[in-house]
Amino acid sequence: MSILGSSLDIDRTDIRWLLDDLRRRRGMANLGRPYTHKELAGLAMLSPHYLGKLLRGNRPVTQSALQLLGRALGIPPEVQTALLQAERRRTTASEYTPATPTRREVSEVEPVPYAAMLVTRGCFDISYVNSSCTAMLPGLIEHRNVLKWLALEPAARAVLGDAWLPITTFFVASFHFYLPTVASDTKRRTILAALVTMKELDSMWDAPYPAENDVPEKFWLKDIATGSSTPTAFNLLKWEYPKGDQLRISFPPVDEEVPANAG
């Protein structure tokens, strides 16, 4: 059981929460203790007085400030854009509803002869899966969410084998960065309730973004119905935020042999 659940203030997961969370965690990784506000201000080339006001909510989070802090804390540009959009929605009390997949997006995953799906940015809700995905990834449709499936479905570990850990790390690390963009308190709580059941969560949560770089190029994807395994790749097509809400994930077979001990 992870210790993260008891330390995460779910009621305060806004953009300032993420900046302060990364201040503590990046400092622990680099110094063995959290960065002080003065140290982070120095890394971001900001005034300590201004940074203190920003983190306390007395100053708005501007794009330029977020860019400087993002560079210091490892927040990629596409996440910065999503965070600023979420912050504007908070200040105007406007709701965010992910767009349904377009016909073109569905056509890119529907006919392929291997597992492929569309998921929403940030919380990774399932938007569409093809028939191969339903057959190869049992339980995915029932959980309706990639994170919940990886955390709660025993078949996920069996199907992905050694690739379960790096693939799950990718999704958890991404969720960490995008958490302030998840407007629904209920959704945040249900996903986190699933994640904290994993003993590996703490190291996943602290992984740098994007963590998909650590996913092996090829791994054995197991068909638990037949017991056979296929050399497979984990592919993803990132969204172009704010134009697109969908992330395309697929598991195409590969021709090359993978080491026998990988399965």
Image: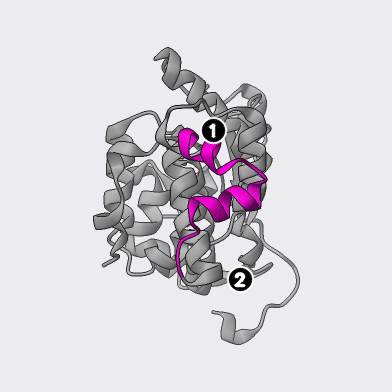
Residue 197 pos. (x, y %): 27, 61
Identify the magenta region: 33-54
Q: Which colour scheme is used?
A: one colour
In-front residue for pair 148/7: 7
Mark 2 belongs to which amino acid? Answer: Phe
Residue under the point 61% across and 85% down: 260
Question: Is residue 127 rendered to the left or right of residue 211?
Answer: left
Q: How crowded is mark 1: few (under 14 residues within 10 Å), some or many (20 or more)?
A: many
- The tag earlier along the polypeptide, 1 or 2, is 1
The residue lying furthest to the bottom in this view is 261
Q: Main secondary structure of the magenta part?
A: helix
Q: Is mark 1 on a helix, strand or loop?
A: helix
Look at the image and tell me in which quarter the C terminus lies.
bottom right
Residue under the point 38% across and 63% down: 201
In-front residue for pair 217/37: 37
Residue under the point 58% across and 80% down: 262
Mark 1 belongs to which amino acid? Answer: Leu
Residue under the point 52% across and 49% down: 174
Query: Is 145 located above or below residue 245 in the figure?
Result: below
In front of the other: label 1 or label 2? 1
Query: Which residue is label 1 attached to?
Result: 83
As drawn, the label of residue 219 is 2
User: In which quarter of the view is residue 83 placed?
Assistant: top right
Residue 224 pos. (x, y %): 42, 67
Marks 1 and 2 sit apart, C-alpha to C-alpha, by 33 Å
In-front residue for pair 140/60: 60
Look at the image and tell me in which quarter the N terminus lies.
bottom left
Question: Is residue 92 rendered to the left or right of residue 142?
Answer: right
Q: Is residue 34 within the magenta segment? A: yes
As drawn, the label of residue 101 is none
Query: Is 22 located above or below residue 240 in the figure?
Result: below
